[in-house]
Image: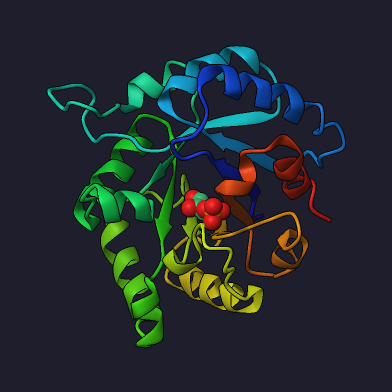
Amino acid sequence: MRKIVIAGNWKMYKTQSEALEFLKGFTSCLTETPEEREVILCVPFTALTLLSKNMHGGRVMLGAQNVHWEESGAYTGEISGPMLTEIGVRYAIVGHSERRQYFGETDETVNMRLRAAQQHGLIPILCVGESLRQREEGEAESHIAFQLATDLIGVDQQKLAIAYEPIWAIGTGRTCESTDANRIIGLIRSKLNNPDVPILYGGSVKPDNIDDIMAQPEIDGVLVGGASLEPASFARIVNYK
Ligand code: 13P
């Protein structure tokens, strides 16, 4: 059975007080949310401990936005698996296109991060997806296949989620056609050895397109940026029909 996963990625937004404010508004909207939906908030490192303390026993899971491949060491600015699991973090986004684009993340480092995350008991959410140029030149499928082939070497597909995030759809309001996202996600599934890996769509997911996206048979959930920052809008997404 494939799990339904609805994850918010706050990126570099929200101080601790703003995070707490969000949580108050958001949790009160989850009373009717079906049990089988996994609801995750991937928040800045500074908000993780605070949220963890404040949602103890709640149904929202916590995720980090990155994780280093070593347990500890001289890696200024990085965070390790044990540091995250100690405070109750369950998931970590790995290989987001913003990390690849602005911070020199490569398929090799993505692979090391994925394996380390799993070793420490975190479930990584691997992000893959093509640029606008790659899409226009008909290279989307081959690019994604290459990312999967290198990123997943030695990775346990029983403890993994994947997000298909076409770069041109991130933060642009330009959502990928849901049928096309469904097609690419089907393609991603065909490259895996575990058909039950939840595969999410990400890129301008909003309250007004979530029902259509989740109606697609291959799409198991969403990874939401901008629309996860506001309690009512993320709650509408989590409570899709
Ligand atoms: P938006 O939902 O803001 O387009 O961001 C998507 C994303 O990058 C989630 O990881």
**Depth check: 55 or 131 in front?**
131
Q: In the figure, 183 relative to 217: above or below?
A: below
Q: Residue at x 43, y 34 (%)?
A: 122
**Left or right relative to 99: residue 180:** right
Q: Does residue 86 appear in the picture of this structure? A: yes
Q: In the figure, 125 relative to 87: above or below?
A: below
- Expressed as whole percent of the image width and height from the top left, the position of residue 154 reads 28, 52
- Expressed as whole percent of the image width and height from the top left, the position of residue 115 reads 30, 43
**Left or right relative to 106: residue 21:** right
Q: Residue at x 39, y 75 (%)?
A: 132
**Depth check: 163 or 112 in front?**
163
Q: In the figure, 240 relative to 51: above or below?
A: below
- Expressed as whole percent of the image width and height from the top left, the position of residue 240 reads 79, 53
Q: Residue at x 61, y 38 (%)?
A: 229
**Left or right relative to 28: residue 44:** left
Q: Quadrant of residue 235?
A: top right
Q: Quadrant of residue 86?
A: top left
Judged from this view, the residue extending furthest toward the right is 32
**Depth check: 230 or 128 in front?**
230
Q: Residue at x 57, y 78 (%)?
A: 183
Q: Does residue 154 appear in the picture of this structure? A: no
Q: In the figure, 52 relative to 160: above or below?
A: above
What number of labels is visible? 0
Judged from this view, the residue extending furthest toward the top is 53
**Left or right relative to 226: residue 235:** right
- Expressed as whole percent of the image width and height from the top left, the position of residue 47 reads 49, 21
Q: Quadrant of the N terminus?
A: bottom right
Judged from this view, the residue extending furthest toward the left is 74
